[in-house]
Image (cartoon, coloured by chain):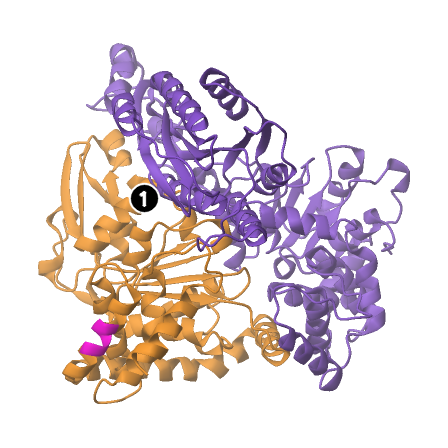
Chain colours: A orange, B purple
Amino acid sequence: MKHPFPFSAIVGQEEMKLSMILTAIDPGIGGVLVFGDRGTGKSTAVRALAALLPPITVVKGCPVNGETAADVPDWAGIETKITHSIPTPVVDLPLGATEDRVTGALDIEKALTRGEKAFQPGLLARANRGYLYIDEVNLLEDHIVDLLLDVAASGENVVEREGLSIRHAARFVLVGSGNPEEGELRPQLLDRFGLSVEVTSPKDIETRVEVIRRRDAYDNDNAAFMLRWQAEDAAIRDRILTARKALKLLKTPEKTLHDVAELCLALGSDGLRGELTLLRAARAYAAWRDDTALTRAHVRDVAAMALRHRLRRDPLDEAGSGARVARVVETVLA
Amino acid sequence: MPEQDTPFGRATLALALLAIDPAGLGGMVLRARSGPVRDAVTALLPALPLPQVRLHPQVTDEALFGGLDLSATLAKGRIVQEQGLLARPAALVLTMAERCPQQLAARLAMALDRDAGHCLIALDEGAAEDERAPQVLAERLAFDIDLGDVAMGDITGFPPEPDEMASARTALSHVITGDDLAERIIGICAALGIDSLRAPLFALRAARAHAALLGHDSVDDDDLTAACALTLAHRATQVPEAPEPPAKEDTPPENDGDGEEQQSDDLTLPDELLLEAVRALLPPDLLARLAAKAARGGTGSGTGAARKGNRRGRPLPPRAGRLGNGARIDIVATLRAAAPWQVIRANGAPRGAGVLVRAGDIRLKRFEDKSDRLLIFAVDASGSAALARLAEAKGAVELLLAQAYARRDHVALIAFRGTAAEVLLPPTRSLVQTKRRLAALPGGGGTPLAAGLRAAHDLAALAKRRGLTPTLALLTDGRANIALDGLPDRPRAAEDALLLARLLRAAGMDGVVIDTGNRPEQALKRLAETMGALYLPLPRANAERLSAAVSAALG
């Protein structure tokens, strides 16, 4: 199988790329939702993200990617303490995945053939410390959505079924993509995504030609193309690592906190999650920009992606919520 | 060499190109009813350099991706895995693609996106206009050929010989593509209003395959023309005829001007000849089809269509069946089914302790989960007739609720009068609550029809999220005379009402518009049409007739 399309070779779509980089810098931001038309590179970007992330250290064979022996759950039955480094897991959640496959369940194979009661970990276990990617997230079945919300909020997966009683860590970044024409997401789920971006096809001819050129080169001369972009991908990865360190030292002035609160109040976003995410995203953005203190400019730049999905829907507003956020940002942070 | 003039010729040419670059072109949608014409095309499928795999819309995940082979595992007493259909590169032939559920479409799309070398032939047998292979798939396939009107006699043209194809396949990577090719293709896409960036890629690859097929060293104009005609015509969203720039409603005018200039100045004009070739193939009903596409709403999370599943709801007795497709095993019932045979089986196949379970013993859990319907009555409480009409509506609500226990209907009532609408009765099944809430109903004032529809729209959205299936019954006799902002302005009120009617239609809501006026009102009829609802003139309706009419209209 070919390597995924390099992240740095994606033309345009700056907002989508930035949002993914921000969650890589601070996973606490809590995931990205990418909504847009068909053929705009949503899936390409998410799959490219995997190659961009720094590797993580895990105990060998641990089903939940535990970092030290203490993190390995008892039921896994793993004795070793040897660790090795693996790429950050990016787990695909297919539509119509059953509850059993998501949370894990009784291992039917072992139960029937050996008469053993064993737990078969699910996708949530595999996604721990990594990314969980849901394509067409708006078509996901309701009961799976509820379950994901619950686990994403608590960071822990609890399985109580078929005589099993198991819990394990499940901290992951949710990345969802979808086409709004095919269905809406419930506000409860929307709110759980930290950032939300809307992508559209590039409109100017030059950009479109460049997209086609690069894709064609990727298909026809894969080796040379990957070589050409590997260095750029590596540069982004290094910048992410530097930004992670810088994030800890970053100062947050009182004034910016006021700005953030004022902005969310003016927009009437529900709950406090908006403020928290906006602050985290702005900090990650400042670290990415290599700035030492958080300023109003940082908040202004990430306000749209952190807040546009938290507004009350107005069926008559055709401009979309992105424009509404921009309007309010203009007046509040003038 | 296949000729491009007939649909059948195009189908054979598309297949030939597909045989040269199967993974790059993704595949094709073949829209035709089952019959000799389609058979003549599918007979050419072996030309593809991939093993053929047939899929049907109900194919399970286990079959696609592989998994535990339960019967073999039980028979052998050890774990036996089976390989899925997608494990190796294959030419996937999806029959009855118009019935392909979204879940399967998403999986196949994922398989195509992964560059695993698959190619998909979607056999679309749709009869009605909106019965089509899922967009998610069609978007990822280069070709879309409609064989609807082809008769047996039209089958002409011969496919290229196998060795011709083989040499074309080796020649493919040596075909030279000029630098301006991408620009020309993008120019054509812009003229046809194609937004997706997959389309120009397919055109580029098809042009290359066409050049390889004809033994050209580089892509020439003929290759490009043939490729664009095959890959772009069915994706067009506007007719490129432009004596005057067709002012599209949703693009701001100043932008439109810019685009025109750009095209004539720094880009070679989209070649007229090339465009002509594509234009000749544009579906004649393009505009009608676009309208139909826009009108059709999708289903989202929280839609409450009636369903009988195996996940949740009221438990039903377990039933014998195969594991797979998300079915859950009922372990107790399975053991109970296996129990009587243990002695015989232990004699037949002695292999240690444990229960001997065979595939035939497997019992599956089943649940019934039927979503409830919500009937939203939006009642015009304006003017003098208000009191009578409200009383009738109230009677109908109570009658419907009386049957609700059996029918699982919820009912809500919205009244609009004066300048605004008010939800008098939030969704409920409680007759007692209804009677208390509806005891006093105020009437009189103007007709804010749009406000009423808006309240219904919001309530419906809320109900959908709670898993109800909303339907709307609108009772009115007059014309809208209060606009959304509460000001008396007849033309704007009518406009607002129509706007909301479109919104309701986009939300995919069923409905019925009941005209209680003495004379049928044309404006209301138009409103019902915009809303996609049934129009029912019912002068002097009483509660019984009303509830009967609503029941009959909404099924």
Subunit of label 1: A
Q: Is residue A41 shown above or below B75?
A: below
Q: Could you tell me if residue A63 is visible in this image?
A: no
Point out residue B486 in the picture as x, y percentages from the top left corner. 44, 53
Look at the image and tell me in which quarter the N terminus of chain B lies.
bottom right
Determine if the magenta segment contains residue A18. Answer: no
Is residue A117 shown left or right of residue B177? Answer: left
Relative to residue A185, is residue B515 drawn left or right? right
Q: Which of B78 and A2 is in front in this view?
A: A2
- Secondary structure of the residue carrying numbered label 1: helix
Q: Is residue B351 above or below residue B79?
A: above
Q: Position of residue B487 (x, y in %)?
A: 47, 54
Quadrant in which residue B198 is drawn:
bottom right
Q: Is residue A259 magenta?
A: yes
x and y percentages locating residue B165 in the rendered image: 76, 58
Q: What residue type is labelled 1?
A: Ile
Q: In this view, does B503 lie to the left or right of B443?
A: right
Q: Nearer the viewer, residue A147 or B104?
A: A147
Q: Image height check: is A74 above or below B395?
A: below
Is residue B192 placed above or below B19 in the rendered structure? below
Which residues lie in the magenta part? A258-262
At x 52%, y 39%, the residue is: B101
Q: Crowding at label 1, few (<14), some or many (≥20) Cα neighbours within 10 Å?
A: some
Q: Which of B539 and A156 is in front in this view?
A: B539
Residue labelled with disc 1: A144
State the residue at coordinates (48%, 65%): A319
Seen from this angle, which residue lies furthest front?
B384
Count of numbered badges drawn on the protein: 1
For the stretch drawn in magenta, the main secondary structure is helix
The location of residue A201, given as percent across then percent down, is: 55, 68
In the foreground, A34 or B156: A34
In the image: residue A284, left or right of residue B82: left
